[in-house]
Image: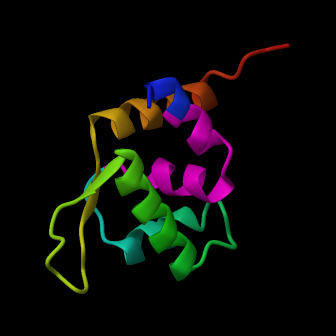
Amino acid sequence: MTNYDLYSWVLRGTQRMAVIKVMDRPKIPRDIRKEAKEFDDKISKANTSRVLRDFVKKGIAVCLNEEQRTGRLYKLTKSGKAVREEIVRGESNPTLI
């Protein structure tokens, strides 16, 4: 997928948007969910885990310690960082219509 395909895919999901916004450094799912609640108050533990699995499948994120059963650390890949950057930039500079 190109960055625009990934960008569009993330934009279409409110939970994906909430998760990517808070992934500014390696974090465990519990902390990601806690911070993502600011953007989507209905995000659950299961939703967060599903979004992270989808991010890994799409190449947006990577798990740094897959062998761990708990406390897995996730961080954005180069593609994921580019998508996050575009989203954050878009929110700070809204286009006037």
Q: Looking at the image, can residue 74 be seen? A: yes
Residue in the foreground of this view, choosing between 55 and 91:
55
Q: How many numbered marks does the figure carry?
A: 0
- Tell me the chief SS of the magenta region: helix
* Residue at image point 38% right, 54% down: 57
* Residue 95 forms part of the magenta stretch: no
State whether residue 91 is above or below residue 11.
above
Q: Position of residue 5 (x, y in %)?
A: 54, 30
Residue 73: x, y in percent?
24, 67
Question: How was the colour assigned to the protein in this rendering?
Answer: rainbow
Determine whether 27 is above or below 85 in the image: below
Q: Is residue 87 visible?
A: no
Name which residue lies at 24% across and 74% down.
72
In this view, the residue in front, 85 or 69, is 69
- Report which quarter residue 68 is drawn in: bottom left
Q: Position of residue 62 (x, y in %)?
A: 26, 55
What residue is rendered at 47% in x and 50% in y?
20
Q: Which residues are magenta?
A: 6-24
Q: Is residue 81 left or right of residue 39?
A: left
Quadrant (top left, top right, bottom left, bottom right) of the N terminus: top left
Question: In which quadrant of the rendered image does the C terminus lie?
Answer: top right
Rendered residue at 34%/45% (across/down) = 59
Percent x, y of residue 76? 31, 47
| Image quadrant where residue 41 sits | bottom right
Q: Is residue 57 above or below residue 53?
A: above
Q: Tell me: residue 90, above or below residue 55.
A: above
Query: Looking at this rendering, what residue extends furthest in the right direction?
Result: 97
